[in-house]
Amino acid sequence: MNPSLSSINARRFRTQKSGQTLIFMTLVIVMLAFAALFYFDVHKILHVKAISRNGGDAAALAGARWQAISLNLIGSLNIAEAVAITNDLSAGQTTSPEADLIAELQRRIAFSGPILGYVSAQQAAKQNGIFNQSQFASEINTHVNLLRTEYGLLHPEPFQPSGSYASAWEEVADMMELASDHGVAVQAAWQYYATYSNYDHLLLNPGFYDAIAGRSWCWMYYNAFDELQNYQNWTYWDDLPSIQVNPPVNAEILSLWLQRVAVRDSIPLLPTGDTWESTLLNLQAALDDLNLNDPVAWGDFDASWAFYNPNRWDGWSDRIPDDFPWDGEIRDEYDYGGADAAMAVRAETERHTEFRGADTINWTAGAKPFGSLEGNVPPNTYGLILPAYTDIRLIPVDASISGGNGALRPGWLDFIINILPAYMNNGPSALPQGNWYADQLRTWEDQDYRQDGLEWLLDNNYDCYRPTGGGPGSSGGTFHGH
């Protein structure tokens, strides 16, 4: 017997409903799978960020701790030097070999202490789960090569070489190479001895290269529109500012920002009852006697000790604009710049819900040694370094002295000091491969690239607005935002 039309339709309906249910369940399973993968990605990114934060902060604190140790040692040696000079002058000697040895030891500590801090920072980062970065190690090795081949020609010896070393720069190079051989997991801010007198030139603004890479035409509109309109070739640029070469008193990494000052003319007067008041008073009296009894010998007397560089150890509150919206005051025992440790960590994490490769996570951290003399007096008050540092604190990276002028950007200092001058003299042919900033400058040389920007701005410039607040610089905001 033939089935009825109604029974056929019923079976078709059940079949269709079953198929729809299967499709719906498949979609639900796929959505749940993507939701689970997304949750896993978010959890993984947050986990890697936490590791990066902990590793960067630990590295900065480790570097700052060695800065504190170095400053305290140098301060103690200043006191020892004062005693040695006083004893020698009181004994009728017009020179002090002991003081010379002490000063030499101070010079060594100003280099070896920060490098030990750099090694300690690497270890602290690794203990917190940060892996070695080949790019960081490559930059260190490049600098080691400069120390071996060029520094002896460019700079005087920072201290007397020891043992079989023919040059102190070879000794410094070996210390840096040893740090590199153990792996470089965290980048510390560098302070090259050669620096520009100012950084007003567009090619010395890291934001310019960020804008090229990101096609940030609005940034160009407010900061480089004339260049975008009128640039033809590399001869368009104004000359770079002059380069100043600072004496090699401090290590280029984790700098202590010290200077050497003649003892004879720089004996600070400490408050009555200060721990070291009598030591410095006795030294002053011995020098006064030498000047009175043997003015020629006093004029020839040559000894120096370590002082704070006043251009770097000024107060933070002096730099804060009057209209800055902040509440509260910086206590005296914390109100000074100077030595600090600025560090950068880089980590990568793969995503499962996207197919664009790994995400790069950057974390920057800063830390600084703090302390005070008797009565909560800032340690730099009298200029002379005295043992005073008892505390290490994290600080905002943008408050860091060492982290300024792009010092935490991989490849930046090498670019502006070594590559950029060659480009200014010879054009794009002097730009090497492998440096990110050189790559962006090559992109800028492409006329089609600049024309794309002009055409975009012709139609969209009304959408551009200048950011306000958030940090220094023409771009508003800052590279160091976490």
Image: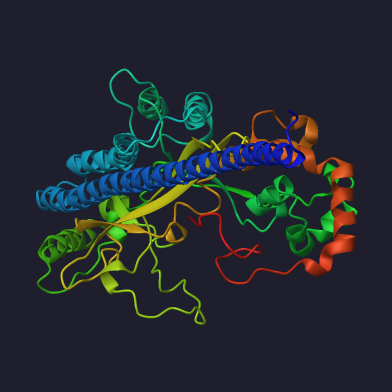
Q: Would you place residue 66 above or below residue 264 in this image?
A: above
Q: Total number of numbered labels?
A: 0
Q: Would you place residue 220 above or below residue 55 in this image?
A: below
Residue 276: quadrant of the picture = bottom left
Q: Is residue 390 left or right of residue 126?
A: left
Q: Residue at the location (19% across, 66% down)?
A: 373
Residue 235 point in image, percent of width and height? 85, 44
Q: Is residue 247 visible?
A: no
Residue 108 point in image, percent of width and height? 30, 37
Q: Residue furthest top?
A: 164
Q: Residue at the location (49% across, 47% down)?
A: 246
Q: Is residue 242 visible?
A: yes
Q: Would you place residue 450 above or below residue 432 in this image?
A: below
Q: Quadrant of the N terminus?
A: top right
* Colour approach in the figure: rainbow
Residue 131 point in image, percent of width and height? 40, 31
Residue 218 point in image, percent of width and height? 76, 61
Q: Is residue 476 left or right of residue 382?
A: right
Q: Residue at the location (19% across, 63% down)?
A: 284
Q: Residue furthest front?
A: 1
| Viewer-side residue, 277 vs 129 | 129
Q: Would you place residue 364 above or below residue 161 in this image?
A: below
| Viewer-side residue, 118 vs 470 | 470
Residue 227: quadrant of the picture = bottom right
